[in-house]
Image: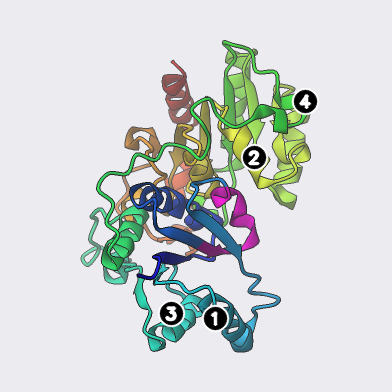
Amino acid sequence: MKHQHILVIRFSAIGDVAMTVPIVWGVAQQYPDVRITVLSRAFARPFFENLAPNVNFMEADLKGEYHGVKGLNRLYRRLAAKQFTHVADLHSVLRSNYLRLRFNLSHFKVEHIDKHRKMRHALVNKNMKKKVKQQLPTSFENYTEVFAKLGFPIEKNLFTSIFPPEGGDMTQLPELFRDKKENEKWIGVAPFAAHQGKIYPKEQMKEVVRTMVANHPDYSIFLFGRGKEEEETFNQWTKEMPQCTFVSQHIENLRQELILMSHLDVMVSMDSANMHLASLVNTPVISIWGATHPMAGFLGWNQDKDNTIQLDMECRPCSIYGQKPCIHGDFPCMKNIRPEMIIEKIEKVLL
């Protein structure tokens, strides 16, 4: 009998790839004799390289070696040579659809994610009479369903972290991050996201940070984010508030970020990748939601719904991914969240 080997496809984005990790772990644990190879972009390697003995990672450069139809055909030939028995397409976009077509034509057992597009459309419908506010299946449930259709149902998924219970190895971090005192509190703050509809106003977030360091001068605040705007903002904050550290000025790679996150007492994040990264290392996340909504199914793994901060507005959610313009023009769903609401949640988690 041919040894069972599952190819798992999910190319992007970082938060969505991160959400596959608990499910891949669950399959790997329940079926230890089944090999699993995750195909993704290079950034995802730290998620999977030490996840389980029967999980491997394979990177695909879709902008270089495997660009275009010729590149995808080259990638397919490379994949087919590995003699997979099952293919789980957890992405279902043009590139993965093409690969799926090739595998189907060659009689592989293939399944793909159901994104529930009709339900999504109803959830964000601008016509309030047609808007249907109901909880959609989560990404984790959608991914789990794909494996069940392939013949690998997960009975109970007990994933908690990619690291041991004590967290990641702090000796792999710069000296600056190695000296966490026994009763010291470390707070992560990730105030940016890919789209405006998912970003809490900077000045209001600054007020949250300013209040926390004023009330708790012995706390350390770690600022997460990369990019020009993030750099300008965080450089200003660190000058004004010495308890703040701009993480990417000291951390070299994603694995180090994950190690640091595993030692945080709480992460304050938007509906963004950082929420999912913190979730992979069992760190509680206070997540702030504006144009998007947890009902769409993207709340982080094992995160407490009580730690979400959002306003009950008729127009919410207006977008699944946060990229749509605001009908009011200024995202009151974010602007009207008072800093005190966030501070109260932080204090509650840290009790």
Amino acid residing under circle 3: Arg
Question: Which badge, 4 or 3, comes first in the chain's sequence?
Answer: 3
Is residue 316 visible in the rendered structure shown here?
no
Of residues 82 and 293, the one nearer the viewer is: 82
Question: Which badge, 3 or 2, comes first in the chain's sequence?
Answer: 3
Secondary element type, mark 1 = helix
How far, Cα to Cα, is label 1 from label 4?
44 Å
Q: Does the magenta stretch include residue 277?
A: no
Of residues 252 and 51, the one nearer the viewer is: 51
Number of marks in the rendered image: 4
The disc at residue 100 is 3
Residue 105's place in the image compared with 350, above or below, is below
Mark in front: 1 vs 2 = 1
Disc 4 vs disc 3: Cβ atoms closer than 8 Å?
no
Amino acid residing under circle 4: Glu
- Report the residue marked by disc 2: 257
Q: Quadrant of the N terminus?
A: bottom left
How far, Cα to Cα, is label 1 from label 2?
33 Å
Q: What stretch is highlighted in magenta?
A: 38-49
- Report the residue marked by disc 4: 175
The disc at residue 161 is none
Secondary element type, mark 3 = helix
Q: How crowded is mark 3: few (under 14 residues within 10 Å), some or many (20 or more)?
A: many
Secondary element type, mark 4 = helix
The disc at residue 76 is 1
How far, Cα to Cα, is label 3 from label 1?
9 Å
